[in-house]
Image (cartoon, helix red, strand yellow):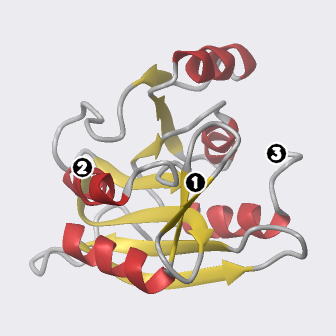
Amino acid sequence: MANTHESDQRLVAKWASGLRGPVIDAGCGPGHWTDFLRKLGVEAEGVDQVQQFIGRAKARFPAVPFRIGSLGDLDVPDGCAVAVLAWYSVIHLAPDELTSVLREFARCIAPGGSLLVGFFEGDAVVPFPHAVTTAYFWPVGEMSAQLETAGFKVHEVHTRTDPGKRPHAAIIARRTDPSIASVGLD
């Protein structure tokens, strides 16, 4: 966690403090956020499609559950999770892929459950070169609209711009269902 911004750690910790039940760290990468959640007492599992990331995560955090999986098919029962963390895991999705992945997150989250998505914020949906593969800037309003289309209601928006860095944003959203106010959340 040494390379993560302190405000990101505070935001994720605050979000996680009310979670009671299974949480999926979707696109967990090398597993540091999954481990962070577990240390907070959250029942988190890390999922990533990159075998090398999962191998590294399992070696570094042997007590934490990790598995290979796709953002577009998390291979879990409907409504099995109280939350999904998608911390910079959707940045590499082309705009035409984002909605289906957000719908998959909605399928996995119980009505009233929570999603925390972190991404690079920009004035328009624009691709840019990133260390691994092309990534995209997303305006907060456009990401919010995508979330609402997928079955979420936006509850909190956080942005920050650090000198010499790309602008960051995070959105906390709830899985909508008019018949259920909340599931597994304090």
Q: Quadrant of the N terminus?
A: top right
Residue 105 vertical placement versus 24 (above, below): below
Q: Earlier in the sequence, mark 2 or mark 1?
A: 1
Q: Residue at x 32, y 72 (%)?
A: 147
The amino acid type found where label 1 is placed reads: Tyr
* Residues marked 2 and 1 touching at CB (< 8 Å): no
The percent coordinates of residue 173 (x first, y second) are 39, 74
The crowding category of the residue bearing disc 2, from other C-alpha atoms within 10 Å (few below 14, some 14 to 19, many at least 20), is some
The percent coordinates of residue 131 (x first, y second) are 70, 41
In the picture, the disc for residue 88 is 1
In the picture, the disc for residue 12 is none
* Residues marked 1 and 3 touching at CB (< 8 Å): no
Quarter of image, res 170: bottom right
Q: 3 left or right of 92? A: right
Residue 88 vertical placement versus 177 (above, below): above
The crowding category of the residue bearing disc 1, from other C-alpha atoms within 10 Å (few below 14, some 14 to 19, many at least 20), is many
Residue 49 vertical placement versus 113 (above, below): above
In the picture, the disc for residue 1 is 3
Q: Residue at x 70, y 38 (%)?
A: 32
